[in-house]
Amino acid sequence: MSDTMRAIEITKPGGPEVLQPVERPIPQPAHGQVVIKVAYAGVNRPDALQRAGMYAPPPTASDLPGLEASGEISAIGEGVTGLSIGDKVCALLPGGGYAEYVATPAAHCLPVPKGMGMKEAACLPETFFTVWSNVFMRGGLKAGERFLVHGGSSGIGTTAIQLAREFGARVFATAGTDSKCAACAKLGAEAAINYLDTDFVDVLKAEGGADLILDMVGGDYIPRNLQALAEDGRLVQIAFLSGPKVEVNFATLMTRRLTMTGSTLRPQSDLAKARIADQLREHVWPLLDAGKISPVMDSEYEFEQASDAHARMETSGHIGKIVLKVNG
């Protein structure tokens, strides 16, 4: 067996064209890690931000993009229990997913759900870790509450709609086209709001306000989100696609007892991510095994077409997840 592998690297900060195929050494598993022979790799916005030079990987992570993948375990490091060579898994990665092999903590691997293909399984980790940790662990969503997710047709959005629906919340979503709104409604949003012609603040206020909002837009959405919250409502921020700086009157946080919080996944400790994985295994994987929820797929690209996949994502025309076929 060769000791090198195909990979896609970021040759310099820039547009999709800076993603180029290279040969790299096959990684070896450190203590507590496994190496996965990658079948499919998920494509996510943080990959594009890293490519553009706006999101540096953690110091110990691979410089290659790719935060999630599916495949078979090909090597196991010391201290790993419960996994065997040949097991089919999907995994949250510290980076390095755009490659034929990737090393990741064993505790961040989850089994491929029953009846699910490798392509779909590659779409699970990044979005499900993000949604579960922010909507349920941090945001504390409960049955019967009103939940608003912006970017409802994105990978995060389509996951959040389904999980909130399954756990008994009333779901509202925003999107920018009628077809995207239709996709949100099909997944279980009782109101899919086209933000180009309808103000989500008015819609939510008419329902009594949102108990929880998951937002990746930021910018001028921040004060509007605070207006759209019910008393004692919570706003969870996971990205700032329209920028992180805006003028806000925070008096409403006091007078209406609002909570504003947020998180990013990648910088969190391996232990924190392992705890999220444990909760997913207990609460969410049974729903995937039963076919009650599933990832929404947009498109698949050949491994060498990573630049085309990034270009597709940056049009924001996609509904659901984009994947690279590595060894599928």
Image: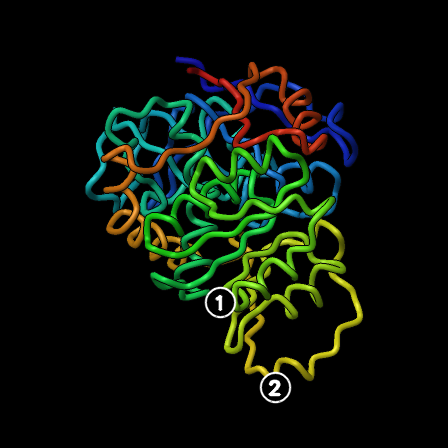
Locate residue 275, reporting x and y percent: 33, 57
Is 244 left, or right, of 264 in this rendering? Answer: right
* Circle 2: element type: helix
Is 202 left, or right, of 69 in this rendering? Answer: right
The residue wearing badge 1 is 211
The total of numbered circles placed on residues is: 2
In the rendered image, which quarter is residue 253 located in? bottom right
2 vs 1, front mark: 1
Q: Residue at x 65, y 61 (%)?
A: 201
Q: Residue at x 40, y 63 (%)?
A: 141
Camera-nearest residue between 47 and 138: 138
166 is higher (above) or lower (below) than 224:
above
Camera-nearest residue between 174 and 274: 174
**Farthest front residue?**
206
Camera-nearest residue between 12 and 146: 146
> Sequence order check: which comes first, mark 2 or mark 1?
1
Is 302 left, or right, of 274 in this rendering? Answer: right
Locate residue 264, reporting x and y percent: 55, 56
What's the residue type where badge 2 is placed?
Met
Judge the density around disc 2: few (<14), some (14-19), many (≥20) Cα neighbours within 10 Å. few
What's the residue type where badge 1 is placed?
Asp
The residue wearing badge 2 is 254
Camera-nearest residue between 201 and 324: 201
Instruction: Check the picture and name the quadrant holding the C terminus.
Output: top left
